[in-house]
Image (tube, rainbow, N blue to C red):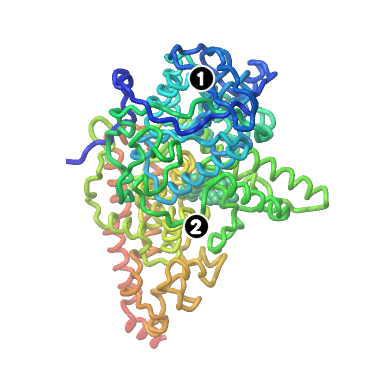
Amino acid sequence: MPKSRKEPKKEVPISELEKPTFSEPATDELPSQTRTKKSTRTKAESKSNGASTSNPPSRPSSGIEPQFKSNANSKPKPEPKPKSRGARVLYWHRTDLRLTDSPSLKNALDIEDIESFWPIWCFDPEYVYRTRVGVNRWQFLLDSMESISEEYKKLNGNQRLWVLRGNPEKVIKKLVEEWDITHLCFEKDSNAYSKVRDQKIIGLAKDLGIQVVMTPGRHLYDPDEVIKRNNGKPTMTLHQWQAVTNKMGEIPHPTPAPESIPDPGPSTLKNDEDQKWGEYQGVDMNRGIRTGTDTCFESITGPSLNPFSVPTMSQMGFEQATTTIRGGTSDGHKRLDLFLSDSDKVAKFSKPGSAPTSLEPSTTLLSPYIKFGCVGVREIWWGSKNVVDIWKKKGGKGETKEPENMFGQLQFRDMYACAEAAVPHFERIRGNPVCKYVAWSLQNQYDSDGNEILPRPKDEDEIAEERFQAWREGRTGFPWIDACMRQLKHEGWIHHLARHSVACFLTRGQCYISWERGMEVFDDWLIDWDPASNPGNWMWLSCSAFFSQYFRVYGLVSWPQRTDKTGALVRKYCPELKDFPDKYIYAPHLAPRGVQEKANCIIGEDYPSPILDEQKEKDLCIARLKDAFSLGYHGNDEDVLNGTAKTRLKELHAENGHTHEKKEEEDKKKRKRDGEGALDKFIKREKK
Ligand SMILES: Cc1cc2nc3c(=O)[nH]c(=O)nc-3n(C[C@H](O)[C@H](O)[C@H](O)COP(=O)(O)OP(=O)(O)OC[C@H]3O[C@@H](n4cnc5c(N)ncnc54)[C@H](O)[C@@H]3O)c2cc1C
């Protein structure tokens, strides 16, 4: 019997948090503060920097004195400070793994009279087990954590990224109690999951009597503010987003990176032996890539020989990554600098004009660095703006405009964020008010309580299931699709227009399979996966929302040929086809047997025959989408929720002859009319 998906997070009973503890030996000698920032900013000024704060600081009475030890180079040991004076700040890195362009970090460092400061990362078992993340994204995250840790060390030899393991509520409670925390600061996120989590954290902070400073900074404008100004509605077009944000003033300039970081306070934590830091009840969504034992959660601080360290892939039980794209704020900034160093490229950046077929990325490849907050969006925006302004001053002409230029790209990202934050169930069809209803094959199924049924029951549509697997594994028999899917799996990134191609093919182009299934594969494999951009773009490509020209379908041969007639990407990712002549590289099944033999690749044996008839399926898909648009259902309509919409739509397809059977019949008639087979044609031609 398939089980229903567990709803997020189980509350941890307080009793469990208060079990007896034992002490772990101290590992670090802590020097005195190298910098205690005395901010002259008032609280009102801090707020005007976008931060929202909760609860005035009130010192928790844990009875633990701050531990200050002298620096080897410094003079006499300072007297231990009496409690309840300076601020003891936890800076919680979640969506930002950078020091530059971080209004949130700036607000944290601007807190008056900082006594101790810990930049932390909290590995949440919910994230580690419940979220689909492939090996390449894991590796990218770990790289990015290492990279920011190095940046902290450069600013203050006593600092690092303090990596903790466990449910954030449990971990934060423990840190507040043991490290005597007064402030918890983090970058605000606006997506549905983060909001629920943040409310819990804010409630916890209130109970613990600490102040929360939550600052937006992940987008050009705070999505919640944009939605508020849009009367609570999502922005469903770039034009809508621009109309609202045009009245919100200039995009803020990036805040400078800090020049120094205060010292941390104590660097030890008691390990509660019986505390289950990795407690999680549900399906491990990453079990497919977890080939080893996960030792990440054995204690809150990680391995005793290297406490608070960034875990390795093997400590998390994961296989090695395959991607060549490595994470980190340092690499991200190198990539940004490289882009900005070519002013012509920046000024004339044109997304539709870039090549999905090129072996080296023809766009910036900044998306994974933006996703993990290794690079700030305002740095890209203002960096590009300055370059274009100087270029124009020097006489440059013919710059590209929105939406195809770099500014348009960043705006699209914000537009999706402002849609996701305002739309319930943005990541699925059922219950999603902006998603048009199409009777796709392999849609998610739900039990009577509305919970998704997982693991998925076998779908009755076996052909669709086979097509889906072939698409996922890059063996559709269409080299362009297969090369893109294999590149995606291997590298965790493909060009935007390659994503268009594979998404269109899977959904409204040919396969007629639910975008939810394709989105899930991207959830697994993309290193730049984003909870707004991924479902948003899948809805766009499947004409479920944002875009509706369902009759415009990407050709499986003509489209890649537009930018590369030689098929370089196919030759790289489908090496079995590498010796085909250019003429057949995107359609090797059309090559005569002799050509196949010469290329050492027989279609149907060494490389699959096409899984479907491109044109026939395209016609059928367009016809069905037309039917769906005529009924005009959306994911939250009662008829969709109770299943009537699916039945009505299927009846309409049958009435209009938009079924495989009818199409087959028509084709047969047509063949008869035109003459069947090669011989008939030959006779006809002779008669002429
Ligand atoms: C089906 C599908 C799924 C996608 N899933 C994601 C995703 O999970 N995460 C993600 O970041 N992008 C996603 N995209 C959007 C886009 O493909 C990538 O942002 C882009 O290809 C990243 O490459 P780049 O950094 O070189 O982009 P560039 O062209 O250099 O653009 C710069 C930045 O602008 C933003 N951007 C550009 N286009 C888009 C867009 N259409 N939507 C949202 N942001 C955009 C990205 O942050 C990108 O890094 C998806 C697109 C499709 C068609």
> At 42% from the left edge and 58% from the top edge, which residue is drawn?
485
Q: Where is residue 601 in the image (x, y as percent from the top left)?
A: 37, 78
* Looking at the image, residue 85 lies above or below residue 342: above
Q: Is residue 643 visible?
A: no
Image quarter of the C terminus? bottom left
User: Where is residue 503 shown, x and y percent of the image?
Assistant: 43, 53
- Where does label 1 land, which residue? 66
Q: Under tag 2, what secondary structure?
A: loop
Q: In which quarter of the image is residue 226?
A: top right
Of residues 229 and 378, the one nearer the viewer is: 378
Q: Which residue lies furthest to the front in this view?
A: 76
Q: State the quadrant of the N terminus.
A: top left
Circle 2 residue: 324
Residue visible at 41% across and 27% down in the picture: 269
Question: Left or right of 441: which side holds 398?
Answer: right
In front of the other: 196 or 62? 62
Residue 358: assigned label: none
Task: Please tell me which residue lies in front, 314 or 68.
Answer: 68
Do we see residue 551 in this rendering?
Answer: yes
Who comes first in sequence, dot 2 or dot 1?
A: 1
Q: What residue type is disc 1 on?
A: Pro
